[in-house]
């Protein structure tokens, strides 16, 4: 009965081992390395022999690092399950110690079929086993002073970089994204060393020249740097959104208005009355030379003031206002028309009023007709008095 159980267990073990061997049976490396020697696999993964021990169970200590992953130290025992190391891309290799002799270790590295050893090298031994490992860790935050701009404007970009690690960050390279139609002014490509716990700020101007209008996502800022031991690291910020609008067109725009000061818009023929003309610049730019042109009815005369003045310019939001005195000589409806002209544009307006004769003028003809009758009546009275005597 016990023999049957042992057979089943052995069969399952062999099956599992066979499956693992099938998945990782390509040997990338398999030979001796001395302490302080290392190999590079596929131009990425570095495996360094830090220490070997001959004991009841032999072992070797390896220091392993790869792109964008910090170096770590692993101890692998002879005959133990192979050490699995996974890259940032999710690809795994397996390290197995075969034998240890003196200061050398024979080990195998298994992984993808196409991977090879790309370099052999030596490195300086650690000064002391108890020396603390210092690792920099940069945190970066990017801010924009404005997130919505127009063509021709400038965005102030600020990068806040803090070293949260316990080692100095050295050889810092800054990789900042670019938008087509813009350029970065004062953006450094490299930064000075940042000590552990220190914070640095970097600012530059992002000039919006002729970038197409739209919403842009600025990819994260990337920092590549090294520790004091030479290990490579990377950090990145979060992305940012920038909205670019078309450049606003600055043009002047004038409005003209005529105001006739009368309670009922009725004037008396032959009497003076004031009219006020106001010109407003409701645009967003200063005008050039501004001229005015009036069109008056034939019987309407200007008796005081200049009705067609000329102005050198009118600023946006500003206005010009003037007054003239007018006289209408004929009764009826009158229309005053005014044009204001600037550059290649113009605006027009009009105002109307009624003119009436005065009370005396209305009854003048009747008075004239009554005078002969009155004179005849006086003559008759006079003659009667003469006959009575």
Image: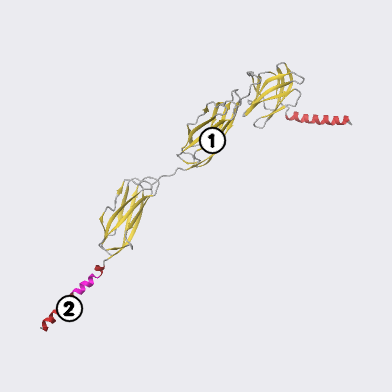
- Name the residue beneath numbered marker 2: 377
Instruction: Please tell me which of labels 1 and 2 falls first in the chain.
Output: 1
Q: Is residue 324 above or below residue 206?
A: below
Between 181 and 72, the residue placed more toward the observer is: 72
Between 372 and 385, the residue placed more toward the observer is: 385
In the visual, does 177 lie left or right of 302?
Answer: right
Q: Is residue 13 magenta?
A: no
Label ID, residue 142:
1
CA gap between label 1 and label 2 equals: 109 Å
Magenta stretch prevailing secondary structure: helix
Which residue, as the protein is rendered here, is positioned at the far top? 102
Q: Is residue 7 above or below residue 273?
A: above
Q: Quadrant of the N terminus?
A: top right
Q: At which x and y percent is residue 119?
A: 64, 21
Q: At which x and y percent is residue 43?
A: 63, 25
Residue shown at 68% from the left, 20% from the top: 49
Query: Residues in magenta?
Result: 363-371
Between 280 and 22, the residue placed more toward the observer is: 280
Q: Is residue 365 magenta?
A: yes
Q: At which x and y percent is residue 224?
A: 57, 28
């Amino acid at each position: 009965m016990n023999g049957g159980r042992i057979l089943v267990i052995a069969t399952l073990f062999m099956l599992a081992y066979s499956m693992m061997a099938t998945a990782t049976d390509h040997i990338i490396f398999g030979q001796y390395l001395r302490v302080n020697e290392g190999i590079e696999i596929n131009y990425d993964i570095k495996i360094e022999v830090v220490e070997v021990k001959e004991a009841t169970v032999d072992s070797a200590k390896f220091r392993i690092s790869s792109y964008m992953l910090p170096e770590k130290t692993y101890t692998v025992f002879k005959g133990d399950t192979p050490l699995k190391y996974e890259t940032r891309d999710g690809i795994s290799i397996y390290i197995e110690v075969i034998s240890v002799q003196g200061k050398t270790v024979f080990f195998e590295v298994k992984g993808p079929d196409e991977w090879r050893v790309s370099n052999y090298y030596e490195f300086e031994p650690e000064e002391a086993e108890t020396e603390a490992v210092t690792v920099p860790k940069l945190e970066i935050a990017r801010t924009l002073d404005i997130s919505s701009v127009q063509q021709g404007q400038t965005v102030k970009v600020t990068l806040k970089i803090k070293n949260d690690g316990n080692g100095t960050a050295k050889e810092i390279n800054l990789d900042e994204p670019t938008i087509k139609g813009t350029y970065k002014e004062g953006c450094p490509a490299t930064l000075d060393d940042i000590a552990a716990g220190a914070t640095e700020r970097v600012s530059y101007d992002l000039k919006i020249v002729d970038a197409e209008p739209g919403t842009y996502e600025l990819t994260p800022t990337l920092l590549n740097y090294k520790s004091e031991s030479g290990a490579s690291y990377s950090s990145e910020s979060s992305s940012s959104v920038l909205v670019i609008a078309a450049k606003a067109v600055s043009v002047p725009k004038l409005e003209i208005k005529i105001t006739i000061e009368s309670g009922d818009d009725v004037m008396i023929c032959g009497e003076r009355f004031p009219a006020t003309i106001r010109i407003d610049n409701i645009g967003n730019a200063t005008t050039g030379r501004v001229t005015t042109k009036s069109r008056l009815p034939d019987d309407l005369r200007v008796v005081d003031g200049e009705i067609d003045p000329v102005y050198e310019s009118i600023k946006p939001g500003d206005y010009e206002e003037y007054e003239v005195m007018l006289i209408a000589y004929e009764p009826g409806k009158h229309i005053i028309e005014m044009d204001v002209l600037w550059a290649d544009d113009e605006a027009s307006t009009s105002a109307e009023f009624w003119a009436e004769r005065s009370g005396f003028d209305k009854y003048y003809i009747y008075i004239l007709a009554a005078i002969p009758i009155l004179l005849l009546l006086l003559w008759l009275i006079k003659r009667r008095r003469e006959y009575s005597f």
